[in-house]
Amino acid sequence: MRTDLIYSDDVLYVNVEGNLNKRGVSNLQKKMYSAISSYGIEDIVIDIKGASKIDKTAFYDMLDDYDSRYGGNLKIMEK
């Protein structure tokens, strides 16, 4: 799995490629939360179109956790 985090125009863009398993979701969450906490980011776009497989339970649990902790604007780009 590969993730790229790009911060531009007050938006954090997260591009995900490869197999997004439970461990990958956990790593993605740590990276995102670190950036959000450090820079006070409220707008996030997660692009999962390049992901070949996704552990949907872990991924959507992460999104629920994000919503309860930060409540920012989150957009998911899917196939």
Image (spheres, rainbow, N blue to C red):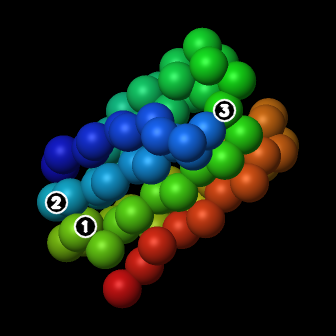
Amino acid, disc 3 = Ile
Q: Residues within 10 Å of mark 1 (few under 14, many from 20)?
A: some
Asked if one can make out residue 62 in the rendered structure from this viewpoint, the answer is no
Spot occupied by residue 44 in the image (x, y as percentages of width and height): 59, 49
- Asked if residue 65 is positioned above or below residue 20 in the image, the reply reads above
Which of the numbered marks, if any, corresponds to residue 73?
A: none
Distance of label 2 from label 1 (alpha carbons): 5 Å
Which of the numbered marks, if any, corresponds to residue 41?
A: 3
The residue sitting at 52% across, 24% down in the picture is 35
The residue indicated by pointer 2 is 18
Distance of label 3 from label 1 (alpha carbons): 24 Å
Amino acid, disc 2 = Gly
Location of the C terminus (image quadrant): bottom left
Spot occupied by residue 50 in the image (x, y as percentages of width and height): 23, 69
The residue indicated by pointer 1 is 51
Spot occupied by residue 62 in the image (x, y as percentages of width and height): 59, 48
